[in-house]
Image (cartoon, rainbow, N blue to C red):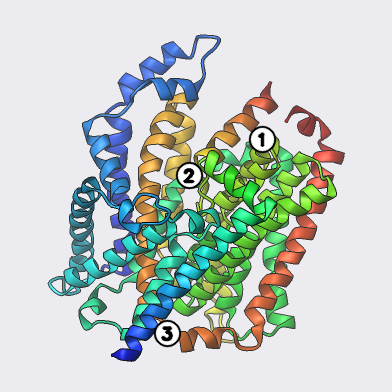
Amino acid sequence: MGNWTEDTTAILLGFVIILLALAAFLLAPYSRVDSALLSAQTSSDFSIAAWSADNDTGNALTAFLSETVNGARPARWSVNPLSAFSTHFFIATLLFLIALCVLFAVGMVLMKKPIAVFFSGFVFIFALGILAYLLANQTEFRSMGLGYALWAILLGLVITNIFGIPEFVRPALQPELYIKTGLVLLGAEVLFGKVMAIGLPGIFVAWIVTPIVLISTFWFGQKVLKIGSKTLNITISADMSVCGVSAAIATAAACKATKEELTTAVGLSMIFTSIMMVALPALINAVGMPEVLGGAWIGGTIDATGAVVAAGAFLGDTALNVAATIKMIQNILIGVLAFGVAVYWATKVDKDAGQTVGASEIWLRLPKFVLGFLGASILFSLLYESLNPNTAIVLVENGVLDFTSDMRGWLFCLAFASIGLSGNFRELKSQFHGGKPLILYVCGQTLNLSLTLLMAWLMFYKVFPEITNSL
Amino acid sequence: MKIDALKTLGFIAALIMLQQLIAFGNNNFPHLQEQSSIIESNDIDPSALFYMESRLALSAEKTVRKLINE
């Protein structure tokens, strides 16, 4: 066996999950579903949503896989947390835990790390993940968008800072491995064909404003606020300007930010997302802003997709559609962002003064998981575009990617639980010295709000009003 | 040991207070009340990180494409 690093192991494990999903959700049912769709879509009143609801496209294997991954998460609850658990939950949890243990045991063997001591610690982290999902599924917490990422970090931090890390957990604290495997799966969800969903106005609002805000905020952090850590600066700038937690994870991994820096960025993003999800639609309503403009503003500025949908839905269907589509286009930018940050760090930041960095040095320094991330993105973008559009929706979007995104959620949850368990409040507090991260986020978001509103108004009302009229 | 138990109870109490605070807001402020009822009735998950986790986001994109192409 060669030298398997966390990056190469993450790529392997990520693609094992992807190949399993492709075999079960795409290859097995392909010919049956594709021919059924080809004949059904000739009908004038064909609707893919109605067809999907009426036809079961899965099989025993896909049902087993979906129910195992989904069933391991506690159900929603309001008052009594015990109501979130069922017999099905315990069976699914056991099966899913065994599957994850096998998967990561392979990873630990490849990385030449001891596996006998890995399992008990992994079970502990997995249990913490279940608790994080339990809190995220509480009615009130869910309504405010307080998701598993926040709870996993918080629970880990609380346990470590009250009781200390149990020794048997340490071998399983592999946040980098969990995050990078999750990022390879996230790459599969980045479908470049979605970029043109709303035409050129979407490109201008999501792909022109966002990089301007990202670069300006990074510059502001370095030159004006003089933030000592470039990695903290870029991670906060990316999560604020692109798409919140997922952008923070990808950027932090690409520039090798510390666990405390990622925690700071994620915490800021989740708190401001909850506030903006409530405040922005209220402001838009108060000033009587048109739905398309309000939707585009929400889509370009609120961090998380779920919060964008919730805020857009408050204004109406048109606002929801525009907001979610703009956010989707912005989400795609995450691939370019991760690659750009990794290359920038390899060529400009991680080098000595006066040193010239050649192609071979860039290759050596580049975090290799980025290649897995981009490879998965390119593979799925090509696959999605090469299939009959309705087959792609049914088998890839609602099948393969539905499964891999659930798996990715679990991997991020395990990563955040590990990050919480290996962090401490004192180090986290030191990140906020002088309130600079908070000032950076607020100033960057103010610029984001201003530029996005201006660009959305220009694009949807002055340059392409015909698109606005058709929505 | 006693301090650890108190800290743990403090954390659980803080969680319950946060939940009660949000419930109070959702029940007493019209804007929050309306938003939480929209979230509930449309089965929206506001914590979804990426578009593939949101059924509504995926269907919004298809609706927008259809409207623009018509």
Image x and y of residue A23, in percent: 27, 37
Query: Where residue A424 is drawn, which disc sits there?
Result: 3
Whether marks 3 and 1 lie on the same chain: yes
Q: Which mark is residue A63?
A: none
* In the depicted structure, whether residue A137 falls above or below residue A322: below
- Identified by mark 1, the residue type is Asp
Closest to the camera, between mark 2 and mark 1, is 1
The residue closer to the viewer here, A350 or A36, is A36
Q: Which residue is mark 2?
A: B52
- Of helix, strand and loop, which one carries label 2? helix
Check the residue under mark 1 and report the chain it is in. Answer: A
Task: Report how far apart the C-alphas of labels 3 and 1 lie in the structure.
Answer: 44 Å
Q: Amino acid at mark 2?
A: Met
| Residue holding disc 1 | A317
Which residue corresponds to the image point at 25% horizontal and 46% vertical from the top-left? A68
The answer to which of marks 3 and 1 sits earlier in the sequence is 1
Q: Is residue B46 left or right of residue A161?
A: right
Q: Identify the secondary structure beneath mark 1.
A: helix
Q: Quadrant of the C terminus of chain A?
A: top right
In the rendered structure, are the residues bearing label 3 and label 2 in contact, judged by CB atoms less than 8 Å apart?
no
Kind of residue indicated by mark 3: Asn
x and y, in percent, of residue A428 in the image: 50, 83
Identify the chain of the residue marked 3, using the numbered disc in the image: A
The residue located at (36%, 39%) in the rendering is A400
Observer-nearest residue: A315 or A234?
Answer: A315
Looking at this rendering, what residue extends furthest in the right direction? A462
